[in-house]
Amino acid sequence: MIKVGILGATAYTSLELIKILLRHPGAEIAYLGSRRTDPPPIGGIFPSLRKSCDIELSPLEPQTVPGDVEILFGCLPHAVTMEVLPQFLRKGIRVVDLSADYRFASPEEYARWYGVQHKDPANLPHAVYGLTELYGDLVRRARIVANPGCYPTGAIIPLAPLLKEKICEPAGIVVDSKSGVSGAGRRPTETTHFPECNESVHAYNIGSHRHTGELLVVLSDVAAMPVDLVFVPHLIPMDRGILTTAYVTLSKEMTEDELLGTLRRAYEGKPFVRVRTDHPIRTKDVLGTNYCDVGCKVVGRRAVLVSAIDNLVKGASGQAVQNMNLMSGFAETDGLL
């Protein structure tokens, strides 16, 4: 049994994380940190947790973290995490960070996509990108795991095997993703206010969304060459889930069965990727799970790849626990199946 804590315990991702950890056979929540002043117990923030988790919220200060906590989950906003995290790292605590602050090895690349200078560049070389299906061996030894973004998770999983095997062209890729409103977080905006987003779908930040940089860096690493793509996110009026459709040009003629074979070989033994042909890929089929469902179609010399994830689980908290499991020597599926 290991003791864990959460920095920023009042986010949607935190609620999902707490629910997963409460049923985990090897982890116990020992600390919940918050920026709120005079906060109630966590059950006062999330009534669904009453009686199952009544832990008091504590300040975001190292001295409030019990000495036996081994892993902290960072659920703070981008640009806040990098100001808070170093003091906890100096205590020797390992971290799974759900913000974007440690996803780029280059502080210049981070500044390009997030518009602020990185305040903890010294720790960037110690961070491992936490997509376990690709970087699991590195995750096991990591001090800092940068949990992937929700949109990149849904796009990288279907695209990576094709780029790694040089099956598709590295340029001209189009990634179209549709996300439920919970991906925007708990704080309402004019765009995510119910009367604005209900019964309506819209694209936003076309070609400039922050996750574009993450996609380019990781897919270029997988391909071992520069990758060029256009990323088009959409907001869709449902609570949770992401459906991603990626369009690529094949490097050679392939049948659909051959392409499916490539995907199946790439994710053989990976418990949370399901390559499917038995049903349309739907967000409803992964709701509340840590699965990524993947399918494909070949249309001439083009391939259309489709994936579905729950943005709060495989796109955030479930994937964070998946990383914790590898870091702590648990079975990868503990708490998630």
Image: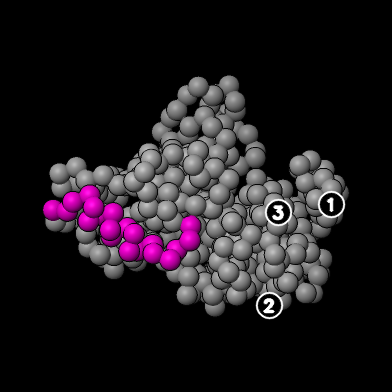
The residues bearing labels 2 and 3 have C-alpha atoms spaced at a distance of 23 Å
Read off the magenta span: 253-272
Is residue 194 shown left or right of residue 10? left
Q: Is residue 123 visible?
A: no
Let me know if residue 63 appears in the view: yes
Q: Is residue 269 left or right of residue 245?
A: right
Which disc, if any, is residue 103?
none
Viewed as shown, does residue 322 lie left or right of 293? right
First-in-chain label (3 vs 1): 3
**CA distance for labels 2 and 1:** 27 Å
Dot 3, crowdedness within 10 Å: few (<14), some or many (≥20)? many
Residue found 72% across the figure and 63% down from its top: 5
- Residue type of the residue flagged with mark 1: Asp
- For residue 132: magenta? no
Considering the numbered disc 3 on the image, is that residue within a helix, a strand or a loop?
Answer: helix
Query: In the rendering, which numbered label is found on residue 54?
Result: 1
Among the two numbered marks 2 and 1 on one chain, the one whose residue lies closer to the N terminus: 1
